[in-house]
Amino acid sequence: NFKREIADKTLLVGLSSTVFRDAKYTSHEVTVDKEQCEWFEQTLKDHPADDGWKIFVFTHAPPNGSGLRVLQENHVVNGCCWLNHSNDAECRKFIELVREHRCIKGWFSGHFHLGQDYQDSITFPTIDPKDGPYPNRGSCVFVQTSVMRSGSSRDGRQQSRMIRGNKDGFEICTVDHKDGGKIRLDATITYSDNTHEVGVYAHGDIADTDEKFFKVYQPSAGDELHPPDEGYIGDRWTDDGTLLVVDEITQDTKAWWNMACGRVLGMLNGMLIEYDPSTLAPLGLIVGADELVGKKIAVIDSGLEECLIDDGELNPGMEGAECEGMEAREQAVLLIDEADGQVTVVQPNEDGSYWRKIVRNKMIRMKEARRIKAAKLFAEDELKLGEEAKVVPSWGPYMSTSGTAKKTGVAGLTTKAENM
């Protein structure tokens, strides 16, 4: 971590992703350790906006709530979009600090290996009410930074960022390394006072005609001036506490709702996704399209009726050991396959979250790959089984170190059996 005062009351702050080799449920460098987080929070307290301080933050991955473009086919399904992604409280902490400390004026990050030609590679803390609900990003402009080397780019762009400060605020520019370092203005931010600013884009999306990376759908809860987006179905609960999400799920289904426990679930591209309740940013994959498309979803009450006691004043109580840890309203998420007459219960994790925390650390998976390689050599050379020897790992779903698992179905159980 570092901090540098580069001008009067203008501070650059950097946080490093230090937990990698033993980080849980992630294969990427997105975890900032506790000591740095505490140092960062104290730095913000020591440089308040009311005293005129302006802080620009730099991290590898962006924080949850930034609103930046994200790849659902990679970072979402593997739960590695945001800083400290696999820990709910730590993941939310960064946007909470942004909202509390309006001295943070800009936050620059990379991680997604996407270019800077899209408007949602820069997000503003405030938008015109006619354009949508208030984004609640404090006083901070979030900025996605691309890559300079062609081999690292997901969309062919080779770009970096340049910040130009002035007496009124600052400008965000792109340096195009495929075009001789040509500089392009992307956005202008003007300070209204120490805690407010106005951002203006210099251009719209600049996308190729065959662009593969489209803007990812993200739920919007609305605000006092705007209703929730058309995908919201949380107002369709029946009197008996049942929610039938859709008749039959397709790749184009978009729907989201709040569970009684506060979790937010929704569908995108045929997948069931969990979203952060505060920011509605995607957290991770619950059910893959291989298991979900063509089925229905229902949410039903599953609480133990024997745990509810009527004390005569309509105040329910609890009794019995079987009621320990019961939520005020317990629910079950069901996948319904009417063709086969099968119902699958989608169980949450022990911490209450639903997204599948199945991504083991990349260093662990590299060791597993070496064991498989050694087993193949042993089968071929020592057991004389030849190159046709079949070697399989006992732990899934990964067969490589790529860190991407888009399927959740179990062949022959929740999906059709594979032909052997």
Image (cartoon, rainbow, N blue to C red):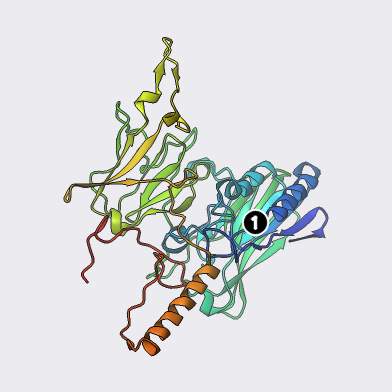
Q: How many numbered tags mark residues here?
A: 1
Residue reaching furthest left? Answer: 339
Vertically, is 385 above or below 259? below
Say if 273 sits above or below 312 in the image: below
SS under mark 1: strand
The residue that label 1 is drawn on is 107
| For residue 352, above or below residue 303 | below
Q: Is residue 106 visible?
A: yes
Which residue is nearer to you in this view: 177 or 245? 245
Observer-nearest of 315 and 292: 315
Q: Percent from the top left, x then y, of residue 176?
A: 58, 74
The x and y percentages for residue 192 are 69, 45
The single residue placed furthest to the front in the displayed view is 383
- Residue 375 % position (x, y): 42, 80
Q: Residue at x 40, y 33 (%)?
A: 330
Q: Residue at the top extreme?
A: 312
Going 42% across and 45% down the picture, which residue do you hit?
348
Farthest right residue in view: 8
Q: Quadrant of the C terminus?
A: bottom left
What residue is rendered at 75% in x and 52% in y?
A: 39
Within-10-Å neighbours for mark 1: few <14, some 14–19, many 20+: many
Which residue is at a point 54% across and 44% down the rendered structure image? 135
Q: Is residue 43 left or right of residue 337?
A: right
Quadrant where the N terminus is found in the figure:
bottom right
Tell me the quarter of the picture where residue 317 sits.
Answer: top left
Q: Quick one: 253 or 130, which is closer to the camera?
A: 253
Kind of residue at badge 1 = Trp
Q: Nearer the viewer, residue 192 or 377?
A: 377
Residue 251 in view here: no
